[in-house]
Image: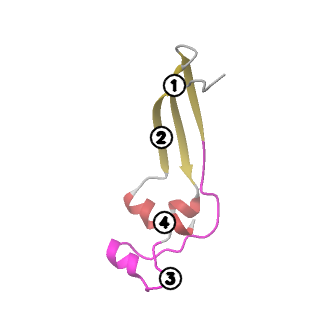
Amino acid sequence: MRSYYSIDDLSIDDLQSVTSGLPTYSAPAGVRSFGAGSMAKYKWSESVSTMAFLEYQRLGNAATESPLIDDRGSPNQLTVGVGLSYSFVVGN
């Protein structure tokens, strides 16, 4: 939590806060996020497949209280993606 949501620097006091313009915040331990997702895959042949996925996450309290999320982000996170895979056999 500290690596992603805290705003401070252990070696130089308040450096991140000054350079970002955000107040200091030390994220406590806690649940980062919870959510759900789904993926669909279509096999075109023995070697070629395509896939698509959708995932929704809601950040936990320790993350949403961070000025990074509160001022510049959203506690609701949506990820969408598509992919193509090609598989083959090496040798027999």
Estimate the spatial distance between the alpha carbons at disc 1 and disc 3, rounded to whole Å. 46 Å
Is residue 37 toward the left or the right of residue 21 in the image?
right
- Which mark lies nearer to you, 1 or 4? 1
Q: Nearer the viewer, residue 50 or 90?
A: 90
For marks 2 and 1 on the same chain, the one whose residue lies earlier in the sequence: 2
Amino acid type shown at disc 2: Thr
Q: Are marks 4 and 2 in contact (CB under 8 Å)?
A: no
| Mark 1 vs 3: CB contact within 8 A | no
Q: Which mark is residue 10?
A: 3
Q: Earlier in the sequence, mark 1 or mark 4?
A: 4
- Decide: is 11 above or below 86: below
Q: Report the quarter where the N terminus lies.
A: bottom right
Q: Which residues are magenta?
A: 7-35
User: Where on the picture, by quarter, is residue 21?
Assistant: bottom left
Q: Tell me, yes or no, if residue 54 can be seen here.
A: yes
Residue of label 1: 86
The label shown at residue 66 is 4
Residue 19 magenta: yes
Q: Residues within 10 Å of mark 1 (few under 14, many from 20)?
A: few
| Disc 1 secondary structure class | strand
| Amino acid type at image mark 4 | Ser
Question: Tag 2 or tag 4, which sits nearer the N-term?
Answer: 4
Few, some or many residues within 10 Å of mark 4 (<14, 14–19, 20+): many
What residue is shown with label 2? 79
SS majority, magenta: loop
Q: Residue type at mark 3? A: Leu
